[in-house]
Image: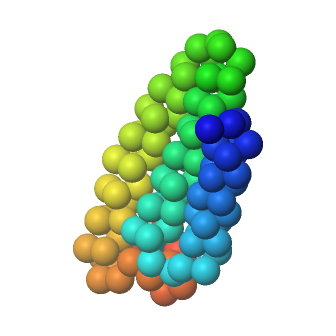
Amino acid sequence: MSLEYYLILSALLFTIGVIGVLIRRNAIIIFMCIELMLNAANLAFVAISRSLGDADGQLFVFFVMAVAAAEVAIGLAIIVSVFKHRETINVDEVNSLKG
């Protein structure tokens, strides 16, 4: 397969993630869409790295995965805390993080 197919798939996945972030109101779904966007960027990094014959893109993927893992850990901790206090994870109903 050529590079264009991978980049088109990456752009499609990124677009689905952006639409999910903009349309959905559930915090967990929003985090899943952000992860989808990060994975789309990873796919583009790996595809371009492979086409250039260089390993730098794959190195960036490891950094993106580390950031994604930290984002999930912190984000889910915040969601659990908000759910305990507000009993909802709808982002429209949780408009501030004040006690």
Q: Nearer the viewer, residue 72 or 56?
A: 56
Res 75 → quadrant: bottom left
Question: What residue do we see at 63% from left, 49% from top?
Answer: 10
Q: Above or below — where is 72 with respect to 90?
A: above
* Image coords of residue 39 (percent x, y): 52, 46
Residue found 70% across the figure and 36% down from its top: 3
Q: Nearer the viewer, residue 15 or 47?
A: 47
Extreme residue in the front direction? 1
The colouring scheme, among rainbow, by chain, secondary structure or one colour, is: rainbow
Nearest the eye: 69 or 61: 61
Above or below, comparing residue 75 to residue 89 in the picture:
above
Q: Position of residue 35 (x, y in %)?
A: 49, 53
Relative image position of residue 91 (x, y in whole percent): 50, 78
x then y, percent, for residue 81: 31, 65
Against 72, residue 67 (above or below) is: above
Evaluate whether residue 85 shows in this view: yes
